[in-house]
Image (cartoon, rainbow, N blue to C red):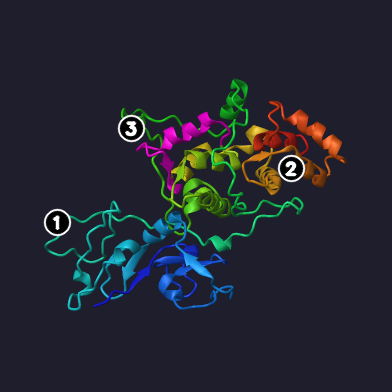
Amino acid sequence: MASLCIGEDYSDELACPVCLDSWKDPVELLPCGHIYCKECVTGLKVCPTCRDAIKTSRTPNRTLVNMALQVKVKCAKCNWVGSREQSSRHVCASKVHPSNAPQDAPSASTAHSWTGNGAPPPQATYQPQPQPPAYSYNMDNFPSYPQPSGGPGVYMAGGPPRPPTNSPAQPPNNGYATSNNANYYNNNYNRPPPPQPSAQRPPGPSRRRYEVIEPVGSCPWTLYGIGQEEYDQIVSIFVFFDQDDSGTLEKNEVARLARWLNFSRTDNEVERIFMDMDSNGSGSLTIGEFLTWLKYNKPNPQALYGLTQSQYNTIMMQFHMYDTDQDGLLLVNEFTRLVMNLGDVKSVEIAERLFGMIDKDRDGRINIHDFLIFRAGKA
């Protein structure tokens, strides 16, 4: 007997607009980018949401696929409960009462499996604990990032435009390696409480400082002490910087993401993120690991720059509008266009002199920390 497994307790952003259930074998339609269950759009010529012609399709980013596979589902026929990944192997027994329906064994890729509401079968010797479903979102729900021709506005959710293919993967050194700047940065960020003796890093490859909090349930942003808009922005940008679609970020990808969000500016600060969270020494971070690190190390705009969160968000948005290759750095021509459009200066010559005053290390680039300090004096 075929099974009918329906998703439970998942975000609306994971729902297929056609079947209104959580994604099953998701596919991303191109060029519009809407995501559906594969079976729901097989044979269609236009996107059901935007009505654009479907030119091709592809598997969504691995981070989204992994989250969809971990959604909790329940069989409407026998009450079996498991993950979406496990449901592909679940078959209802035609003559088994729902309360006695056998449970599928956990998959090799999942540490635990969800258990049913009924009593376990007599032959069962082990009943694993449930693993909550993961949260994801539809990338199309995020608005396009403002173009450089636009003026300043409010902070917007969503990822930046994809940089040119010839952009360097490894972000350049931005010159903030002095002890004074490092002390200023470290002293003015929210610091986590010191770990208890039992939480000290053990010898060997496992060095994780924080227990990972996975983004589960319908309101995962509450787990990290941030709002939904900020959470959606961080997750969408995480996927954007995952250039190889592996579902994780390697060090060079984390470095670009952390600088883009003003979370770190030096190689040592990026290394600290990995020392705190990369317990198995894989050299990459999952979305859960990155969000957990952020929970304890989020920048404090008031302590750093004397800005409110709203002012900080607006200045960040202004910077990213003119950072054309989204590397977290402004060149002199980008800075000139920005300050002239903001009305800070009246001529290119004055803008270039101002750039030289802010660019203290004379490397021809201004990072977002420099720009925030400059704008904070005008807030």
Q: Nearer the viewer, residue 341 or 325?
A: 325
Residue 26 position within the rendered picture, expressed as x and y whole percent measured from the top left? 43, 66
Q: Earlier in the sequence, mark 2 or mark 1?
A: 1
Height in image: 269 above or below 32?
A: above
In what element is the residue under mark 3?
loop
Between the C-alphas of marks 2 and 1, the distance is: 65 Å
- Residue name at image x 62 percent, y 31 percent: 174
Between the C-alphas of marks 1 and 3, the distance is: 33 Å
Q: Nearer the viewer, residue 232 or 271?
A: 271
Q: Earlier in the sequence, mark 2 or mark 3?
A: 3
In what element is the residue under mark 2?
helix
- Residue name at image x 47 percent, y 56 percent: 61
Looking at the rendered image, the disc whose residue lies closer to the viewer, 2 or 1, is 2
Between the C-alphas of marks 2 and 3, the distance is: 43 Å
What label does residue 135 carry, if any? Answer: none
Residue topped by disc 1: 125
Find the magenta span and give its range: 264-288
Identify the image quadrant of residue 357.
top right
Looking at the rendered image, the disc whose residue lies closer to the viewer, 2 or 3, is 2
**Which amino acid type corresponds to the residue marked 3 in the rendered image?**
Pro
Residue 312 position within the rendered picture, expressed as x and y whole percent measured from the top left? 67, 42
Residue topped by disc 2: 334
Residue 261 seen anywhere in this rendered image of the structure: no
Looking at the image, the residue that sits furthest to the left is 123
Residue topped by disc 3: 205
Q: Earlier in the sequence, mark 1 or mark 3?
A: 1
Q: Is mark 1 in CB contact (under 8 Å) with mark 3?
A: no
Residue 274 lies in magenta, yes or no? yes
**Which amino acid type corresponds to the residue marked 2 in the rendered image?**
Glu
